[in-house]
């Protein structure tokens, strides 16, 4: 599975951005998908993840209520809608995919086998 993230950019605090991640291959609908991020000088952290059908999602407490993860299996794409952005959301955002057939929706990096190249989100105050 190859992952290509896009949609990052510069936005003012309080604004919104939508990240997209296009996946290659025919098995997209059987991969748990997620997003991680790494801010300047910070550890990589989990952001959100979504199950196969899109009906089950989990979020980091820091983004709950502001970010929404979704997927379109017909387009092999996962999205991260980010609203009410804060300067502390500034980071490189990575799209990730779990191994084929895994059902559990995890929040640790070692649960995800495939990683995209990252897209930079900068939130100015």
Image (spheres, rainbow, N blue to C red):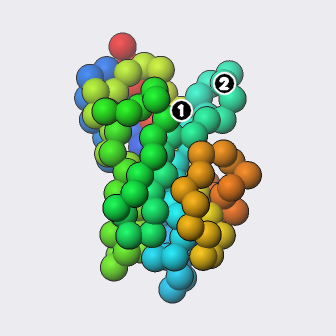
The residue that disc 1 covers is 91
Q: Residue 55 carries which label?
A: none
Q: Out of 74 and 51, give the one closest to the viewer.
A: 51
- Badge 2 density bin: few <14, some 14–19, many ≥20, Cα 10 Å: few
Count of number-bearing discs: 2
Residue depicted at x 40% and y 25%: 123
Q: Is residue 16 at least partly visible in the picture?
A: yes
**Helix, strand or loop for disc 2:** loop
The residue that disc 2 covers is 42
Q: Residue furthest bottom?
A: 26
Which quadrant of the figure contains the N terminus? bottom right
- Badge 1 density bin: few <14, some 14–19, many ≥20, Cα 10 Å: many
Q: Is 100 above or below relative to 122?
A: below
- In the rendered image, which quarter is residue 112 located in? bottom right
Q: Is 70 above or below relative to 123?
A: below
**Dots 1, 2 in contact, CB < 8 A:** yes
* Between discs 1 and 2, the one toward the N terminus: 2
Relative side of 42 to 6, left or right: right
x, y percentage for residue 93?
Answer: 53, 43
What is the spatial separation of the Cα atoms under label 1 and label 2, in whole angstroms?
9 Å
x, y percentage for residue 48?
Answer: 47, 45
x, y percentage for residue 40?
Answer: 62, 24
Residue depicted at x 33% and y 79%: 74
**Helix, strand or loop for disc 1:** strand
Q: Is 36 above or below relative to 95?
A: above
Relative side of 58 to 68, left or right: right
Residue depicted at x 36% and y 13%: 125
x, y percentage for residue 11?
Answer: 33, 29
Residue depicted at x 66% and y 45%: 108
Q: Is residue 3 at least partly visible in the picture?
A: no
């Amino acid at each position: 599975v190859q992952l290509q993230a896009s949609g990052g950019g510069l936005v003012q605090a309080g604004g919104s951005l939508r990240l997209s991640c296009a996946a290659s291959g025919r098995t997209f609908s059987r991969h748990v998908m997620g997003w991680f991020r790494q801010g300047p000088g910070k550890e990589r952290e989990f952001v959100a993840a979504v199950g196969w059908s899109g009906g089950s999602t989990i979020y980091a407490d820091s983004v709950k209520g502001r970010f929404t993860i979704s997927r379109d299996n017909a387009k092999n794409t996962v999205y991260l809608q980010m609203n009410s952005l804060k300067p502390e959301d500034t980071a490189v955002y990575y799209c990730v995919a779990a191994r084929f057939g895994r059902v559990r929706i995890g929040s640790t990096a070692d649960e995800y086998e495939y990683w995209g190249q990252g897209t930079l989100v900068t939130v100015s105050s």
